[in-house]
Image (cartoon, coloured by chain):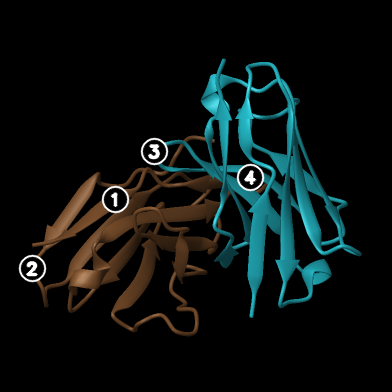
């Protein structure tokens, strides 16, 4: 049950696109299309942004997109906005457990 | 409106016990798997436990196995986490989250383990 690996921080200017990687193993990310992404603002509960690798829940902006290749999943935020500044976590089903990523702080410059 | 409201957190001494509750409303609770997730102060998210919709399948993180027990009462639309033999490292905000993809989260309840 080792955490998935994410970059500690990613930054970008308003309007730019950024991508956050999430690297797991063949036991989690690589084996299941059950990767999700969460946005968490300070002092708030996490919010689901992407599920099943690339699906967006109702109400989530289409500026958020997800993908997966092998053992690595990715979250792309296009047209970066000030309100996107937050912590982001990936998450993968792993059979008899669920594992989160280490978290990435997104800064809008 | 979907709501998950956690309660039962507080200050407890090392070795002590605490029972968390999660009250669900706005959806058919008995149809959904549920999870507990925690977040230590200033740290990332850590999955704690999973229970199937009927309660027949349960999983735990290695860090809590043998000390924590997850359960549910579908008649009361409630999820529980019994926490025994608590340690300082169990200090965290505990969230309940709906579904295998953790699609909706409560606001959390803070558990502090300290003497």
- In space, the residues marked 4 and 3 are separated at their CA atoms by 20 Å
To the question of a shared chain for discs 4 and 1, the answer is yes
- In space, the residues marked 2 and 3 are separated at their CA atoms by 26 Å
Q: Identify the residue at horizontal 43%, vertical 61% (top origin).
A: A38
Secondary structure of the residue carrying numbered label 2: loop
A16 up-or-down from A103: above or below: below
Quickly name the residue at label 4: A97
- In space, the residues marked 3 and 1 are separated at their CA atoms by 11 Å
Write down which chain is painted brown: A
- In space, the residues marked 2 and 4 are separated at their CA atoms by 37 Å
Secondary structure of the residue carrying numbered label 4: loop
Q: Identify the residue at horizontal 45%, vertical 44% (top origin).
A: A25
Disc 3 to disc 1: CB gap under 8 Å: no
Quickly name the residue at label 2: A13
Q: Identify the residue at horizontal 73%, vertical 65% (top origin).
A: B24
Horizontal relation, residue B100 to residue A80: left or right: right
Q: Residues within 10 Å of mark 2 (few under 14, many from 20)?
A: some
The dot on residue A104 is: 1
Task: State whether residue B31 appears in this view.
Answer: yes
Disc 1 to disc 2: CB gap under 8 Å: no
The dot on residue A3 is: none
Q: Tell me which chain the residue with mark 3 is part of.
A: B
- In space, the residues marked 1 and 2 are separated at their CA atoms by 16 Å
Quickly name the residue at label 3: B43
Q: Tell me which chain the residue with mark 4 is part of.
A: A
Q: Give the mark nearer the N terminus: 2 vs 4.
A: 2
Q: Between B50 and A81, which is closer to the camera in this rendering?
A: A81
* Colour applied to chain B: cyan
């Amino acid at each position: 049950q080792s955490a998935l690996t994410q970059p500690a921080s990613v930054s970008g200017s308003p309007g730019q696109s950024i991508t956050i990687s999430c690297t797991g193993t063949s036991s989690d990310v690589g084996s299941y299309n059950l990767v999700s992404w969460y946005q968490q603002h300070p002092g708030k509960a996490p919010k689901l942004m992407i599920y099943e690798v690339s699906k967006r829940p109702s109400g989530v902006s289409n500026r958020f997109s997800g993908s997966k290749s092998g053992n690595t999943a990715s979250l792309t935020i296009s047209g970066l906005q000030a309100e996107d500044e937050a912590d982001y976590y990936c998450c993968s089903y792993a059979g008899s457990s669920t594992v989160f990523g280490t978290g990435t702080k997104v800064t809008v410059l | 409106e979907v709501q998950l409201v956690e309660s039962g957190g507080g200050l407890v001494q090392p070795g002590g016990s605490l029972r968390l509750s999660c009250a669900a409303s706005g959806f058919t609770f008995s149809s959904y798997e549920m999870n507990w997730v925690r977040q230590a102060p200033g740290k990332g998210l850590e999955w704690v436990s999973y229970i199937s919709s009927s309660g027949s399948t349960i999983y735990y993180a290695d860090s809590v196995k043998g000390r924590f027990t997850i359960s549910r009462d579908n008649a009361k639309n409630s999820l529980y986490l019994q926490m025994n033999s608590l340690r300082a490292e169990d200090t965290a905000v505990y969230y309940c989250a709906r579904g295998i993809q953790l699609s909706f989260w409560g606001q959390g309840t803070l558990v502090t383990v300290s003497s």
